Amino acid sequence: MGNGQWDIPELKKMMEDILPTNNPVLDYEVEHEFPHIGRKLMLLNAHRVELEGKFKDRILLAIEDITERRNRGKIH
């Protein structure tokens, strides 16, 4: 995805761990350095979705950028 900028080992491991199970991933934090926009802290939630038909296993993934919210809570 995104010219390789989403090739994040932590994200890949999380995705591989939920496909074979029915366990959701809730409030999983991933920090990553992106080209052009810098370091971001993201909050991920993922659920396995079962569909009928040809493509059966899917993951619904919600990503929220919480960098600013986290930075506001820090004292400088």
Image (cartoon, grey):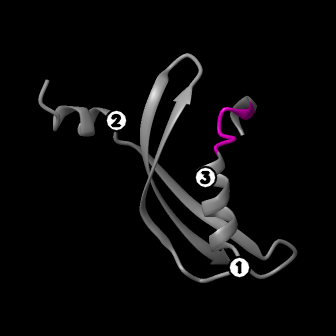
| Amino acid type for the residue under numbered disc 2 | Thr
Q: Of 57 and 44, which appears nearest the observer?
A: 44
Q: Is residue 2 magenta?
A: no
The residue that mark 1 highlights is: 20
| Amino acid type for the residue under numbered disc 3 | Leu
SS at circle 2: helix
What residue is drawn where x is 70% and y is 66%? 16
Spatial separation of the CA atoms under disc 1 and disc 3:
15 Å
The residue that mark 3 highlights is: 11
Q: Of 11 and 3, which appears nearest the observer?
A: 11
For the image, the number of numbered tags is 3
In the picture, measured across the screen, residue 75 lies left or right of residue 13, that is: left
Tell me, yes or no, whether the two marked residues, 1 and 2, touch with CB atoms within 8 Å. no
SS at circle 3: helix
| Image disc number at residue 62 | none
What residue is drawn where x is 25% and y is 38%? 69
What segment is highlighted magenta in the picture?
4-8
Q: Position of residue 50 (x, y in %)?
A: 68, 80
What residue is drawn where x is 54% and y is 80%? 23
Asked if residue 28 is positioned above or below residue 48 in the image, the reply reads above
What residue is drawn where x is 66% and y is 32%? 5
In the picture, measured across the screen, residue 53 lies left or right of residue 19, that is: right
The residue that mark 2 highlights is: 67
In the picture, measured across the screen, residue 2 lies left or right of residue 35, that is: right
Q: Position of residue 75 (x, y in %)?
A: 12, 30
| Amino acid type for the residue under numbered disc 1 | Pro
